Amino acid sequence: MKLGDGVEQAIHCATLLAAVPEGGLLSAAAMAEFHGVSVSYLLKHMQALSGTGIVQTVAGPKGGYRLGRAPKDITLLDIILAVEGPEPAFRCKEIRQRGPNPLPASAFARPCQINAAMLRAERAYRNELKSVTIAQLVAEVARDDDGTIEARGCAFLAEHLRKPNSKPTN
Amino acid sequence: MKLGDGVEQAIHCATLLAAVPEGGLLSAAAMAEFHGVSVSYLLKHMQALSGTGIVQTVAGPKGGYRLGRAPKDITLLDIILAVEGPEPAFRCKEIRQRGPNPLPASAFARPCQINAAMLRAERAYRNELKSVTIAQLVAEVARDDDGTIEARGCAFLAEHLRKPNSKPTN
């Protein structure tokens, strides 16, 4: 079981966008540079975040991304479901019903006990992810920072922040 | 995030092997037939279970598999880690340390807060999986069964059970 690298990138981008002042934007190229990752790969994940309203996209040469709602209203679960899709990690193929000498479907009226157990674990995972917001992560970074991480972020924003007048495209 | 199909197959095989009487074995071919899956694919996962002691392998033309310990001592987590490997789903690449204007490593002395949050969720997931044993799943299937599932299993075992005299190879 492995989450794609896009999850780490998308969460870091959300925490970076949380530092963008009202009306400001960051391009995918700037965020990719800041995190040392591929722009084309990052764009794919920003589109996924945009599709679920976690970020807003402003089109055009001076366009870019901003958060679609307050950092306190964006959870890790929101981001992971946007990037990885909504399906649970365990995808029951009902192999209990296959094989020789098949039984009538009525023998399997109750959900497979294995699937039920796996889905309980998935719920525990998701509940934990739902309890963590971008606002909380930003506060934790600030708490542990002696000022150097913030200073680097401010210098980066000063160089890359965009302030367009256009409306978001979604 | 997706678990491979091997997880479902390995868990079902463990519950099937829990029904094998003392001294008996089932071949991978029989278990593949019972679940309607590919033998070669199943063999790979049985080897993974064997490598961690969840099953024992008896070599030879009358060989096969049996559980390596009591069903109450085999958890879903044991099986998933055997099949999928021990790494957590989220694999931090430390992208916070990349990009232009790198900071000294001392700025990142504390674990990334994002990684820490993801690992908390992984712990919640694993704790839930650790709380479910093969013995418990077998009991749940029996509880929900009107007898037809058990009868099919018994008929299958009567046809496919092996009773060799050889010692396990691991």
Image (cartoon, coloured by chain):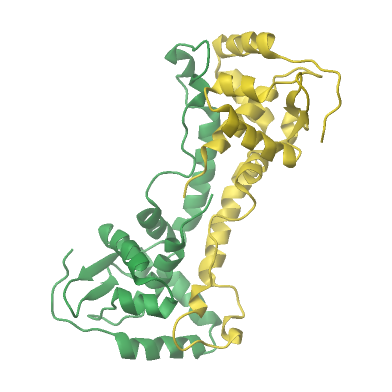
Chain colours: A green, B yellow
Q: In this view, does B18 lie above or below A133?
A: above
A18 or A95, which lies in front?
A: A95
- Tell me where residue A133 appears, x and y as whole percent: 42, 65
Q: Let me know if residue A95 appears in the view.
A: yes
Foreground pick, A88 / A132 = A88
Q: Residue at x 76, y 22 (%)?
A: B63
Residue at (55% x, 72% y) in the render: B112
The residue closer to the viewer here, A116 or A64, is: A64
In the rendered image, residue A89, in percent from the top left (x then y), is placed at 48, 44
Residue A49 placement: quadrant: bottom left
Is A156 situated above or below B4? below
Q: Is residue B167 left or right of residue A22?
A: right
Work out whether residue A18 can be spotted: no
Furthest residue toward front: B61
- Picture quadrant of residue A11: bottom left
Q: In this view, does A56 lie above or below B120?
A: below
Q: Where is residue B127 in the image (x, y as percent from the top left)?
A: 63, 48
Residue at 38% x, 47% y is A86
Q: The C terminus of chain A is located in which quarter?
A: bottom left
Residue at the image position 65 percent from the left and 25 percent from the top? B28
Q: Is residue A63 left or right of residue A142?
A: left
Counting the numbered discs, the total is: 0
Q: Where is residue B73 in the image (x, y as percent from the top left)?
A: 75, 35
